[in-house]
Image (cartoon, rainbow, N blue to C red):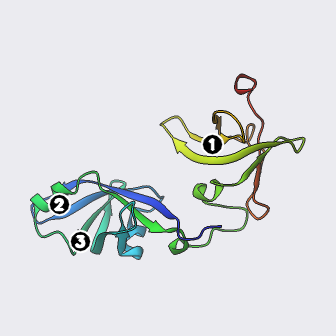
Amino acid sequence: MTGDRLILVGRVAGAFGIRGELRITAFGDDPAALLRYRDLRRADGSPGLALTGGRAQKGALIARAREVADRDQAEALKGLELYVPRQALPAPEEDEFYLADLVGLRALSPAGEELGRVKSVQNFGAGDLLEIQPTDGPSWWLPFTNEAVPEVKIADGLVVVVRPAETE
């Protein structure tokens, strides 16, 4: 199910200092974890940055990259989104999962009715949302809460969701 999917793990926020270091906003709990991947990719899978060292600082990673020699080059990369292949991420603990693993799962009602598939997982600032794409019609959004999504069964390829009345 995970295949060669790329997972967004960070974004270059800009230059740090005058020697070509980058400030990278990391989308995980530990910004320094980006150093484990070393070779980060662009959204299209092409090479992005090869990190050669760094340190966590105030929720970000301050890093050196092979491709960046000075502040101007670092500043030019501002906004670059950085990805890793899904299979490069560590295996989740039992009863845990990555939000990216929800994409593509079947969405069923508590009664077992097929509602569609999880099209995407987004966070626009107020919490995670699942976008459900039914077989017919427009997609709809659902907050990723215990009330709205009482069951997640990654191994079975499905989530149980309580569809809000306003989306019916």
Task: Please tell me whether mark 2 sits on a helix, a strand or a loop.
Answer: helix
* Viewer-side residue, 66 vs 31: 66
The mark that comes first in sequence, 3 or 2, is: 3
Q: Which residue type does callout 3 highlight?
A: Ala
Q: Is residue 42 above or below residue 109?
A: below
Q: Using the numbered discs, state the Cα–Cα distance from disc 3 to disc 2 in whole angstroms.
A: 9 Å
**Circle 2 residue:** 74
Crowd band around label 1 with a 10 angstrom C-alpha radius: few (<14), some (14–19), many (20+)? many
| Residue at mark 1 to residue at mark 3: CA–CA distance | 34 Å
For marks 1 and 3 on the same chain, the one whose residue lies earlier in the sequence: 3
Q: Residue furthest front?
A: 136
Quadrant where the image shows the C terminus: top right
Provide residue 14's location: percent of width, then percent of height: 22, 53
Cα distance between the residues tagged 1 and 2: 34 Å
* Closer to the eye: label 1 or 2: 1
143 or 158: which is nearer to us? 158
Report which residue position mark 1 lands on: 130
x, y (%) of residue 31?
Answer: 39, 62
Q: Is residue 15 above or below residue 119?
A: below
- Which three-letter amino acid code belongs to the residue tagged 1? Leu
What residue sits right under mark 3 in the picture?
Answer: 65
Mark 2 packing: few (<14 Cα in 10 Å), some, or many (20+)? many
For label 3, count other residues whose C-alpha is less than 10 Å away and answer few (under 14), some (14-19) or many (20+): some
Q: Position of residue 140 (x, y in %)?
A: 64, 34
Q: Residue at x 14, y 65 (%)?
A: 20
Residue drawn at x 71%, y 37% is 136
Quarter where residue 56 is shown: bottom left
Discs 1, 2 touching: Cβ within 8 Å: no
